[in-house]
Amino acid sequence: MLNLVTHKRNLKNYFSRHQKLKLTRYSLIGLFLNVIGYNVYLLLTSLYIDPKLASATIFLLGTLASFYGNKKITFLNRTRSSYSLLIYFLILSFALAFSQFNLYILVDIYGYPHQLIQLLNIILNVPLTFTMADKFVFSNHMNSK
């Protein structure tokens, strides 16, 4: 019972006002980059580029833009750490693998429209990537390395 109370307190502290502000900034940057990325994705697929290749291309470009935008605006982090970029890249690589898996299963096997599934992937990846970036990339104790 004590663990449950401690867990609830930790969760409440995690979603403090400061965290909510960071999540809002993260979401706005993500929305901006994903609107651009999604439109580029639609353009690439309209040129008959495979949806998974288009998604991977957008991922690589979006990762760099997202890292630097979130580093400076969301997390107000001014350190120069290639380690942080590596961890961020690994986190987003996991998100890409999740997206690619969804595209393969839901589009290639079940025939759902790739446009809808890619949009769903974007929505599902936001809370995952925010939490991991906050804890493992841009937290103060991680940037001392």
Image (cartoon, rainbow, N blue to C red):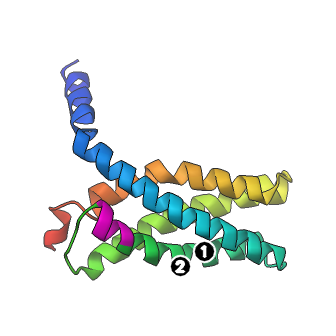
Query: What residue is disc 2 on?
Result: 61
- The residue depicted at 62 percent of the width and 60 percent of the height is 99
Task: Please give the name of the residue rendered at 72% of the width and 54% of the height, measured from the top-left corner.
Answer: 117
Which of 47/109 is in front?
A: 47
Mark 1 is on which residue type?
Ile
Q: What residue range appears in magenta? A: 69-74
Q: Which mark is residue 144?
A: none
- Which quarter of the figure has residue 46? bottom right
- Asked whether disc 2 touches disc 1, contact meaning CB atoms under 8 Å apart, the reply is yes
Instruction: State whether residue 116 is above or below residue 96.
Output: above
Across and down, in percent, residue 127 comes to 45, 48
Tag 1: Cα neighbours inside 10 Å, few (<14), some, or many (≥20)?
many
Q: Is residue 71 magenta?
A: yes
Q: Give the Cα separation between the discs numbered 2 and 1.
A: 5 Å
Q: Main secondary structure of the magenta part?
A: helix
Residue 96 in the image, given as x and y percentages of width and height: 57, 65
Q: Would you name the residue on which mark 1 appears? A: 58
